[in-house]
Amino acid sequence: MVDAVGEFETVTPLSSTSAHFDMLDGSTVYTLWNGTVLSSEVAGLVRIVRYSGLEASVDAATIDAASASLPIFVVLSQSKGFRFAVRRAHSPKSGQPPAAGARG
């Protein structure tokens, strides 16, 4: 998995190909790959960051991770100052989300 979300309070694996991070600044980051669908509870404009570092603001309903073999990060920011930095710590090929309670 990728150590890409920086300092976080908690991580909750949602499936073998997705996880939910609660950030120290109150933001939420979802990681999605290999066909994972974003929860329907997430709606409106969100920021996505691809593993390559490319960023875009998109409507949550249009996010498609079906062909994403590398993670897509969906950022729901409470803070305008939230900065997302992609740091590759481990190979994403394991397909496993980080262990619960792991810190970035």
Image (spheres, helix red, strand yellow):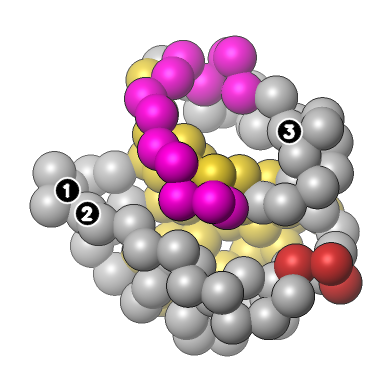
67 left or right of 73 in image = right
User: What residue sits 59% from the left and 14% below the top?
Assistant: 62
Pointer 1 or 3: first along the chain: 3
Mark 3 and mark 2: span between their CA atoms?
A: 23 Å
14 left or right of 72 in image = right
Q: Residue furthest left?
A: 81
Is residue 18 in the magenta section?
no
26 left or right of 48 in image = left
Residue ID for mark 2: 82
Is residue 53 in the magenta section?
yes
In the rendered image, which quarter is residue 40 located in? top right
Answer whether labels 1 and 2 touch (C-beta < 8 Å). Answer: yes
Q: Is residue 10 visible?
A: no
Residue ID for mark 3: 65
Residue ID for mark 1: 79
Q: Is residue 21 visible?
A: yes
Image location (x, y in percent) of residue 68 = 76, 40
User: Range of the magenta residues?
Assistant: 51-63
**Quick one: SS at disc 2?**
loop
**Quick one: SS at disc 1?**
loop
45 left or right of 2 in image = left
Image location (x, y in percent) of residue 11 = 57, 69
